[in-house]
Image (cartoon, rainbow, N blue to C red):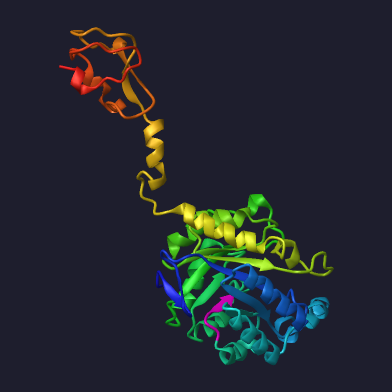
Amino acid sequence: MKKTFKIAHRVVGGDAPCLFIAEAGVAHFGDMGMARDLVDLAAEGNSDVFKIQIFDVDTLLSAEAEEWKDRLRPRNLTLDQVFELKEFVESKGMLFMATAHDQSRLSWLEELDLPAIKVGSGELGNHWFLKKLAKLGKPMIVSTGMYAEQDVVELLEAIESTGNDELALLHCVTSYPTPAGDVNIAAMDSLARVFSGPVGYSDHTEDHLAVLGAVARGAKIVEKHITILRDIPNAQDWKVSAGPEDLAQLVDDIRKMETMIGSGVKKPAECEAGGMSWALKSVVAVRQLPAGHVLAEADITTKRPAGGIPADQMEKLLGRVTSRCFAKDEKIDLTGIE
C-alpha cells in the first residue's frame, strides 16, 4: 500500500496536514435545508471534507429489522439531492464524500465520481462488498471499529487482491458514546505495524480529547460527527458530535496540535534564545578570592545568569590559579585565571 496518496488536491499521509472529515451522517434527517446548514457548519469550522451516509433501507436491512427501517427511511436522500448537496459542498471549497452502506448505492458512487470512498466499520468481514468498493478505483478510507488485528490483515488481503493500493485505515470504537477507558488510541500503533499506509482515527466520544490525542500520536486523518440538533429521540450520532458551539475550536485545536508536534528533532527552539541568557548559569566565586589562589571545588559554584564561563566548564577550572582578586558572586573569567 502507498504511504501517501492524493484525495483530489489533498495529500494524505507523510508530512501532510491531518485531513479533517466532518461526518454529517444522517444528521440532516432527510431535510435539505438542514443538510445545507450542516454544510455551512462544516465550512465555517474549516473542515476539509463534508461526508454523509447513503443507503436504501430495504437493501441495507432485513425484514427482522422493521423498526430500524422505520427509523432510517425518513433520513434518506435521493440521488438528485445528493448531487445538489455535493455541488453545494464543493462551492464552499470542501471535498464531498459519502459512505455507501449497501450495494444499491455502488452505482451512486460511480455517478457522483467522488474523490475517495469512505467505508464504515459495519463492513467488517464483508469482503465481497469491500472488493466492489475497491474496484471503483478510488482511494479508500476504512474505519476499523470492532476489528481485531487478524480482521485488519484479512481486510488488507481483500483490498490488495483488487489492485487498489491507495488505502487509509482509521482506528474506531463502535460505541455511542465511547467510554474513555475503551478509546485505545494506541491501537493506531497496531494498525501501523501491519499496514504501511496512512493511519487515522474516527471518533465516537463526547468531547475532543481523544481527537487531539490521536493527532498528537500521528493520525493522518480524523473523522468527527457534526450536528446542529441535540436530544433527538431514536438517534445516537448527536451524542458524539461537534456542533456550532465547538466545531471551529476543535479544528483550530487540531491545527495547533500539529504545529506543536514539530519536526521531532531535539534541538534548541528559536524562541529559547532569550531564555538562554537568563536561565543558564555561569561559574562564580563562592566567596572573595585573592590573587594567586588555587581554585578548589569549595571556591566556585554556578549561578544565573549566563554570559560567563558556562557551567559545563566548571570542573576544568579546578586547580588553576587566580591572577587577580574576585569578589563574592563575581563571574570567573579566563582573563583572571592562569
Front residue of 44 and 151: 44
Q: Is residue 202 magenta?
A: no
Question: Where 58 falls versus 319 (above or below)?
Answer: below
Residue positioned most to the left = 338
Which residues fall within the magenta stretch? 114-119
Report the side of 113 relative to 306 (left or right): right
Residue at image coords 31%, 29%: 307
Instruction: Count all numbered tags in the image, as a single digit.
Output: 0
Residue 144 appears in the picture as rendered: yes
Front residue of 288 and 301: 288
Q: Splitting the image into 4 quarters, where does residue 96 fall?
A: bottom right
| Residue 246 place in picture, x, y as percent | 68, 60
Report the side of 265 relative to 240 (left or right): left
Front residue of 281 and 112: 281
Residue 176 appears in the picture as rendered: no
Question: Where 112 falls versus 148 (above or below)?
Answer: below
| Residue 159 place in picture, x, y as percent | 48, 77
Residue at image coords 31%, 12%: 327
| Residue 333 place in picture, x, y as percent | 24, 22
